[in-house]
Image (cartoon, helix red, strand yellow):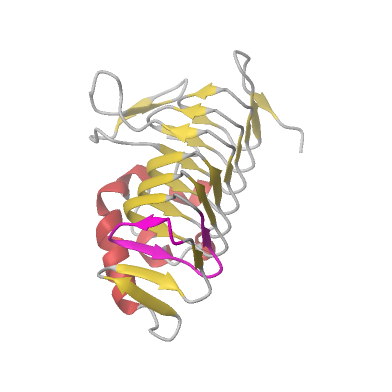
Amino acid sequence: MKNIKIIDLFDLNHTISKDYLTKYSYPYEVLPFIKDIILEIGKSLPSDEYTEIKENVWVHNTANVYPSAYLGAPCIIGKSTEVRHGAFIRGSALVGDNCVVGNSVELKNVILFDNVQTPHYNYVGDSILGYKSHMGAGSITSNVKSDKTLVVIKDDESSFITNLKKVGAFLGDYVEVGCNAVLNPGTVIGRYSNIYPTSCVRGIIPENSIVKVNKPVVISKK
């Protein structure tokens, strides 16, 4: 399947999970193991840089976590990351350096690479967000099909059964997702792509694409 391998989507130098992600070919293969990855990394974090604020919750000493935010185990909050008012990290969340987890944002079973922004009213579940990707206000990852069957990732040429009931979205590096966009289960968005506000997206979006509501995908002339 073209353009959905981990090496096609992400620069692994921008996540502390690099050594673990290199063991897999496709990002959906990582989802069942995110919890274990976080636990392994957490136990090896330098104690002079990270504080284990409660069991299996590690926060970098330079991170800014608002008192009203909830951090569920296991999770890691990276250097200079901001977790704002009312954020709900349910658990199994690896949040990189210089990230923003905003007000009323919910994270669950995710890896956020460095410099990712989920700043306002986002739900991100069973997903991986690449370096400097950004989700506009109200945009969400839908991670379960309405008929509760296994998620299938599709493009125009082929389809693949992930053997998983819960699969969100995989955003390549530098992806921009507009306000109130919905990324349907198993959506894969290639690097440098731009999803316009209120779009409903599914399948595989090639890198350098522009997606508009009810219009064909356009490849940018960058």
Looking at the image, residue 127 lies above or below residue 205: below
Looking at the image, residue 53 lies above or below residue 37: below
> Where does residue 6 sit, x and y in percent of width and height?
45, 49
Q: Residue furthest front?
A: 68
- Residue nearest the observer in this picture, 212 or 102: 102
The quarter of the picture where residue 106 lies is top left
- Residue 26 visible? The answer is no
- Residue nearest the observer in this picture, 109 or 70: 70
Assign the N terminus to one quadrant of the image: top left
The reply, left or right, for residue 216 in relation to residue 151 is: right
At horizontal 61% and vertical 17% (from top left) the residue drawn is 213
At horizontal 25% and vertical 70% (from top left) the residue drawn is 55
Q: Residue furthest right?
A: 221
The quarter of the picture where residue 141 lies is top left
Looking at the image, residue 220 lies above or below residue 132: above
> Where does residue 212 sit, x and y in percent of width and height?
64, 21
Q: Is residue 196 magenta?
A: no
At horizontal 57% and vertical 63% (from top left) the residue drawn is 98
- Span colored in magenta: 67-84
